[in-house]
Amino acid sequence: MKIKDIKKALENAQGGELKGNASRRLATLSIMIYSLLKTNHSRLTNLSKVVCPDLDFQSRVKKFKRWVSNEYIDTEHFFCHF
């Protein structure tokens, strides 16, 4: 399974194609899901090892950390449908 396949499935579950910040957040979620499936670990450092090799390792960790601590990410928006 590829990241774009996961993102497409998440978009379909949301009810269509998303735009703007919602699309960017969904893209990060799909990257995290892909990493979870590849590594079978939930530590941000382990997730960061799998994706985005062109970015610095600490940047990848910070990206996931920002996503998790974002005030606009809540269970009703992202997790209830899946």
Image (spheres, rainbow, N blue to C red):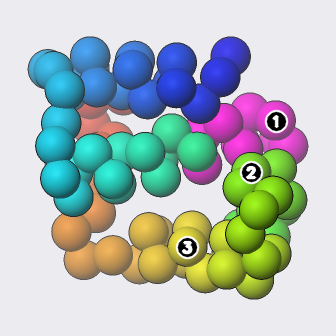
Relative to the observer, which residue lies in front, 73 or 11?
11
Tell me if residue 35 is in the magenta stretch: yes
Mark-to-mark CA distance, 2 and 1: 10 Å
Above or below, comparing residue 4 to residue 53 in the picture: above
Give the answer, above or below, for where 69 lies relative to 39.
Answer: below
SS state under label 3: helix
Q: Of marks 3 and 2, which one's residue comes earlier in the chain?
A: 2
Residue 32 image offset from top left, x and y in percent:
60, 49
Tell me the SS state at disc 1: helix
Amino acid on which disc 3 is placed: Lys
Name the amino acid type tagged 1: Lys
- Mark 3 is surrounded, within 10 Å at the Cα level, by few (under 14), some (14 to 19) or many (20 or more) other residues, namely some
Helix, strand or loop at disc 2?
loop
Q: Amino acid at mark 2?
A: Val
Relative placement, left or right, of 73 versus 52 is left
Residue under label 2, please give it. Answer: 51
Which segment is the magenta one?
32-41
Q: Which residue is mark 3?
A: 63
According to the image, label 1 marks what residue? 38
